[in-house]
Image (cartoon, grey):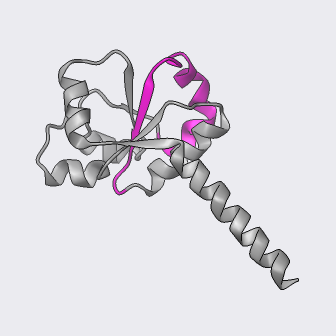
Amino acid sequence: MRLRVSLLVAALLIVTAAAADDVRPVSQTEMLKRIERNDPATLIVDVRTPEEYAAGHVPGAVNIPYTHLPARASALAVGGDKDIVLYCQTGVRAGRAAERLRQHGFTRLLHLEGDMKGWLEKRLPTER
């Protein structure tokens, strides 16, 4: 019994690590470069609440709260040939959003390093 539990835990850790590898980090510097060149191959998705988004967001980001992603995944599929950069305030919701998008077959997922908190700490540009 103990061996089964250990094997199950090991299998879950491997699956979790593999899922985390599906989302590549993108640095704030790289994100800023993509924004400055208006990169058509990048879709920036702010998964925070509409209120948080309205208070300030990464330039060019669209707001789709992570709780709305299952219903709006088809809208993102139109840009299927794009990198989808996800961010929230600290990273928790962006991770959940990535999992939901993976379940819908998205593979070009990136996570903004530092999320909005880090973006603001570096005093990078925002929009309202």
The C terminus: image quadrant:
top left
Occupied quadrant, residue 25: top left
Asked if one can make out residue 128 in the rendered structure from this viewpoint, the answer is no
Q: Residue at x 18, y 37 (%)?
A: 126
* Magenta region includes residue 80: yes
Q: Position of residue 109 (x, y in %)?
A: 48, 35
**111 left or right of 102?**
left
Q: Residue at x 60, y 42 (%)?
A: 100
**124 left or right of 23?**
left
The residue sitting at the bottom extreme is 2
Q: Residue at x 40, y 55 (%)?
A: 91
Occupied quadrant, residue 124: top left
**75 left or right of 116?**
right
As rendered, which of 28 and 73 lies closer to the eye? Answer: 28
As rendered, which of 117 and 29 lies closer to the eye? Answer: 29
Residue interval drawn in magenta: 65-90
Q: Position of residue 3 (x, y in %)?
A: 82, 80
Q: Residue at x 23, y 31 (%)?
A: 59
**9 left or right of 20?**
right
